[in-house]
Image: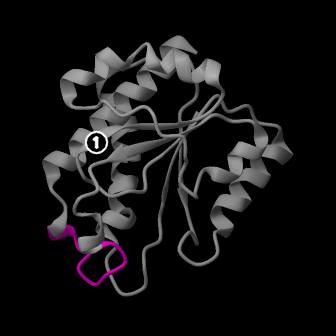
Amino acid sequence: MVLGAQLDSWDFAEGAHDDGTGVVQCLEVLRTFKALGYDNNHTIRVVLYANSENGGMGRETYAMSVKKKEEKHILALGSDSGGYSPRGFSLDMSPQRRRLIFEWKNYFLPYGIYDFDQTYAIQDIAPLKKLDIPLVEMVVDTQRYFDYHHSEKDTFDKVNKRELLLGAVAMTQFVFMIDKNW
């Protein structure tokens, strides 16, 4: 399974929300599992895509590599909407897979994570769809998204640590559920 975020940012900003927060969240999933001594059933890989903001060669190159090496990926999970409060997961996959995840919804509800109805995936994992890999994007509360997106205001002081970590927790829980049940 692959967790992905873009490593580059828009030219005139630090890129804290776009997409430093996604990078942190992906790495935090691995850090948490290691700290817990979690013995995962599937390989969990983090890919930090380069050139996302200027052509997307990082995502295309990764997808070509997966295809060439005939690597099996059971899922690709991306985070690229900023480090805001998590609200759910967009599920770009078969109806059968979606139904399995819908069954887990009650495990997420106590944390304010309720939206599992969307069906799009971020551009960085999108090329993996051609390889029949189920895609998932974390959905966040976007009411402040365009206050910072692609602007000089997208700096680290604008990231709320609690919201950032809530997103990492949501991703960790999602990855755990996939790892144990797929």
Mark 1 — residue? 86
List x then y, in percent, for residue 45: 55, 39
Q: How many marks?
A: 1
Which residue is farthest bottom? Answer: 12
Q: From what the image shows, is residue 178 above or below residue 56?
A: above
Left/right of residue 181 with respect to residue 155 in the rendered view: right
Left/right of residue 158 with respect to residue 68 in the rendered view: left
- Residue sitting at 81 percent across and 45 percent down? 67
Q: Nearer the viewer, residue 167 or 103?
A: 103
Q: Quadrant of residue 157?
A: bottom left
- Quadrant location of the N terminus? top right
- Residue sitting at 47 percent across and 71 percent down? 8
Three-letter amino acid code at disc 1?
Answer: Pro
List x then y, in percent, for residue 110: 19, 22
Q: Quadrant of residue 102?
A: top left
- Residue sitting at 54 percent across and 40 percent down? 119
Left/right of residue 88 with respect to residue 117 in the rendered view: left
Q: Nearer the viewer, residue 58 or 153?
A: 153
Q: Which residues are magenta?
A: 149-157
Q: Nearer the viewer, residue 72 or 122?
A: 122
Q: Quadrant of residue 71?
A: top right
Q: Could you tell me which secondary element the residue under label 1 belongs to?
A: strand
Q: Nearer the viewer, residue 97 or 2?
A: 97
- Quadrant location of the C terminus? top right
Left/right of residue 29 with respect to residue 144 in the rendered view: right
Q: Is residue 9 magenta?
A: no
List x then y, in percent, for residue 159: 19, 61
Check disc 1: other Cα within 10 Å, few if <14, some if 14-19, many if 20+: many
User: What type of secondary structure mainly makes up the magenta span?
Assistant: loop
Q: Is residue 154 magenta?
A: yes
